[in-house]
Amino acid sequence: MHNEFTAVIERDGDWYIAYCPEIPGANGQGRTIKACRKSLADAIALILEDRREDGLRGVPKSAIRETVTVE
């Protein structure tokens, strides 16, 4: 699935820090913009995976589960 999110990147001394306004708690850091962006992308992926797993807990086995693609 392909999703795009906003990365807000700022310089903080020798580091770059980033956050994603659409995903509360998603933050990244790195010595380069590229490393910072990758760190943020990894954080977003982990948060979404955790939310997906958490959201599926307690779903009855008799419920229909399908994949919906958002473009």
Image (cartoon, grey):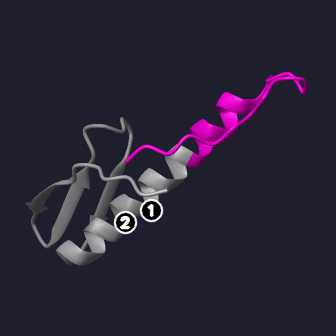
**Residue 39: which disc?**
2
State the residue at coordinates (29%, 63%): 29
x and y percentages locating residue 27 in the rendered image: 33, 51
Question: How many neighbours does mark 2 have within 10 angstroms: few (below 14), some (14-19), or many (20 or more)?
Answer: some
- In the image, is residue 7 above or below residue 21? below
- In the image, is residue 64 above or below residue 27? above
Q: Which residues are magenta?
A: 49-71
* Cβ–Cβ under 8 Å for marks 2 and 1: yes
Is 55 magenta? The answer is yes
- In the image, is residue 38 above or below residue 52? below
Camera-side residue: 43 or 57?
A: 57
Amino acid type at mark 1:
Asp
State the residue at coordinates (30%, 37%): 22
Q: Main secondary structure of the magenta part?
A: loop
Amino acid type at mark 2:
Ser
Question: How many neighbours does mark 1 have within 10 angstroms: few (below 14), some (14-19), or many (20 or more)?
Answer: some
Secondary structure category for the residue under label 2: helix
